[in-house]
Image: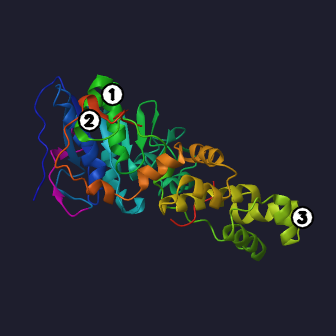
Amino acid sequence: MAIMIRPRPTTARRRVAVLIFDGVKMLDFAGPAEVFVEANQSLSAYDVVLLSPDGGEVTTSIGARVSVHGAAEGAGRFDTVVIPGSELPPATFVTPAVLASARYLAANTRRLTSICSGAFVLAKLGLLDGRRATTHWKFTKDLARRFPQIRVEPDSIFVRDRNIYTSAGVAAGVDLALALVEEDHGTATARSVAQSLLVYMQRAGGQSQFSASLNAPIPRSPLVRAVADLIWADPSQPYTVQELAERARVSVRHLTRLFRADLESSPAEYVAFVRFAVAREKLDAGHTVTETATAAGYGSHEAMRRAFVARLGISPKKYQQRFRSTVSSLSCTSPSPAPRPLGVSGSKEYVARGEGRPALP
């Protein structure tokens, strides 16, 4: 079944081009497109135009075939261009045809955006050189490694650098699109769209809170591995670098050098990393904040709170509420709660925008 979005013909609207291709992540382009189309419920705002490199149908990440309005090259001028990503490796989906299409669109738009690994398309074209940018947390290290001239911000939900906007993966495209609507038509319109789509205008914290890539590198040195195992075995102990060095029977300087070489971290940083990893695991398992702080070796609830805010931008309690089981939310006995005015849920307003062992900070 072919899917088609038909823009209403009017010169008053901002034209938004979305470049799609075989293997494109469905939500990467459908999420932002829905935000723009939803804005049309309250005002004549956007014409969303789907384009492909050759003007033909594409097969998305879920196997659906999607029709487009035409080929990218020769499609004319646009206010905004959206380049989505893919679950396929960048080397696979960033083809010459995709690059040629993106190059044409980039030269014919006021505002250029990428979603998820779509940042690799812009990077390959050199459009992100010397700029700040982000992508999905799974790809940030690869983006920084392959394109060192880009200032990659791995924890950002989205980044604006002049007229180029890059976002993290999947649902972050909705955050970015809401920010663009707010930029174009004001906070009230963006809030209305967010309320209709049941999303927040601005989520607390960055990508780190969603990252499941929490696997620490395995130490190569037997000595470092022994010290790391000691810390993981009982993170509640008040470890000092001096104590760890004494247990390892080496100097503090030598132990620090080995940790830097193996784990790109000092012993003290590694202890903090382990405490944070254990704390997340405990909270995910349903332990209370107080129990977690004790088990993870934080001196107090406040010390753990500061660690979570510093790393994730949210408190331990907020983290636990956000990532606990969805079962409780599915067992609501009331058939359909009455809508709350102005997007207020309880006392909090819907305001929208932008495991294993954790990776070392």
Depth check, front residue: 291 or 271: 291
Marks 2/3 in contact by CB < 8 Å: the verdict is no
Which residues, given as a range, are shown in magenta?
Answer: 62-75
Q: CA distance from mark 1 to mark 2?
A: 13 Å
The spot of residue 298 in percent (x, y) is 67, 53
Q: Which mark is residue 251?
A: 3
Residue bearing mark 1: 182
- Element at label 2: helix
Side of 5 relative to 302 (left or right): left
Side of 138 relative to 358 (left or right): left
- Find the residue positioned furthest to the bottom: 222
Amino acid identity at mark 3: Ser
The spot of residue 34 in percent (x, y) is 22, 42
Residue bearing mark 2: 195
- Element at label 1: helix
| Most common SS among magenta residues | loop
Q: Which mark is residue 299?
A: none
Depth check, front residue: 253 or 130: 253
Q: Earlier in the sequence, mark 2 or mark 3?
A: 2
